[in-house]
Image (cartoon, helix red, strand yellow):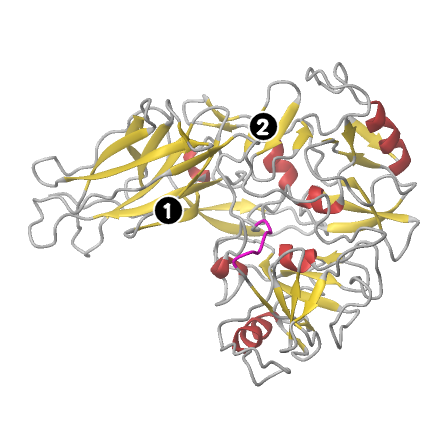
Amino acid sequence: MSQLPAVRAESWRDNVPRESLVTTHQTFRLMPLFFFLLAAPISATADQWPNNAVSGTVTFKGAPLAGVTVTAYNTNTSSITQVVTTGKDGTYRLQIPAWIDTAGDGADYHIWAIKRGYAFYPSAPAGATVTRADHTGDFAGNGIDDVPIYFTVVHYVSLPDRNNRGVAGPPLTGVNFIAYDGSNPPLRPTADLASRKRGPWTPRFTDNRNGSVTDELTGLVWLKDAGCLGAEIWDTALKHANALAAGTCGLSDGSVAGDWRLPNINELESIVDIFASNPALTPANPFINVSHAIYWSSTSYFHGQAGSPSAWAIRLADGRFINDWVANDKATAYNRVWAVKSTAGAKLQSTGEYVEFSPGDDGHIQAGVPLTFPRWIDKGDGTVADTVTGLVWLKQANCIVGTWQNAITAIAALASGTCGLTDGSAAGAWRLPTRAEMESLSDRMQTNHADFFNHTFLNRDKSVFQPAIFTGFMSGQYYWTATIDAADRASVWTVYSCDFGVYDAPRDSISYALPLRSGSAAPDPMHGER
């Protein structure tokens, strides 16, 4: 009986960080994937090893979805083992080989779903897990500076009966997938989660009278004393936040070590109030000892599986993201530490980061609404739908460029027949996205978002697996948002196209704009205030 090959080989990819620094990072690389082409079977024959059954149902808005391709990919051999298609009842059934090698390891599979016009998110029963997985090496590239792509898969180790290896193991049932097309997003963001409406409004924060504060907008629970944990290097910040418990920092909430953690970058961003500065928090909030300095997030600026020396942080004086590789260097920078707890009602998007660099970090916790795969739907009319948020974007990302006011004027006139649009939209149908909406495009496993958005992923036979999400997404450029910098009203928040950090820029500077179709999110309380 032949030995099966190793699980994965390694490859390298160049980063393009915001501050014009260049480094390399390591990613796991899987070997060629010929999508829809059934690969050669693994070396063990049917009479040597049994097949395990894997089954489930694919639904869209609660109804069965037919014609969905479900793929079982063997990571040991880096090849597709089986491809099946759902029937009218939305069900599928895989029969995939089960084996144990001489080291005691089993057949390792990634299972995912694909159908044009849809994205998917799976559920996994006991015996399997849902995870993101790096499949960059399965596509045409040079193995050096390839643009990464991450699938959302069910990870399953297929084992035979341990007492009789010629007998199949128990079937894996309930490997189900929910389909999304942008009209049924798992997350419906407001135009700016962290903004407060003008006029009479319900207080954003509730003092729980036990040393904690609940954010009614996001559902997150924050430590009331934002200065208790002091300033630390990143790894120590993670440890101190995770060790927090009742009896420390004014807490009498019954919490134990492990309940609290450092917030990820989306959670830290969510507490920023776009109308406030010094600090950028909603006025009359119940927090104490809030610093105007930089606060750590638990999200690494991804440099590859081998290590990431910097982490995302936010300056609370104004809400600016910090990614200069000095003030956010994990080993040398001392930044403030603020702890958070998740609740069942929390409603923020996950960052997409799934690689763990330290216990309690973002890659370990993976808090938030997870990302679908494939996330983006090209509507074929010059627009792109984000299936996670339901937001609809202009596909042509380099059509509008100029000062902030130029961009607002151009977007007000945007209509079908311009910028590649054939959607029937009229002038006034589009608007500039808010800071939060623009940030919702991010995936913190990507170090150069522009490269990813522009890239066409080709199978090894040169057929197209995934077309470019946007066209002309400008690398190394800033994109306007509708959100004014409250600390400097002559400036506006922009998002940098590579790292997708939030940085302020003068209104009269030249930047690009990526319009958002009005009505695809709640009205922006800042929109219209110039």
Q: Range of the magenta residues?
A: 344-349
Q: Amino acid at mark 1?
A: Ala
Measured from the top left, where is residue 312 in percent x and y?
65, 59
Question: Quadrant where the C terminus lies?
Answer: top right
Is label 1 in a helix, a strand or a loop?
strand
The answer to whether residue 178 is magenta is: no
Q: What is the crowding at mark 1: few (fewer than 14 residues within 10 Å), some, or many (at least 20)?
A: few
Question: Which of the two marks, 1 or 2, is nearer to us in this view?
Answer: 2
> Along the line of sight, which residue is nearer the eye, 66 or 397?
66
Q: Quadrant of residue 241?
A: bottom right
N-term mark: 1 or 2: 1
Q: Amino acid at mark 2?
A: Ala
Horizontal placement of 10 versus 347: left or right?
Answer: left
Magenta stretch: dominant SS? loop
The numbered disc on residue 219 is none
Q: Which residue is label 2 attached to?
A: 468
Is label 2 in a helix, a strand or a loop?
loop
The numbered disc on residue 9 is 1
Tell me the residue at 64%/46% (across/down).
16
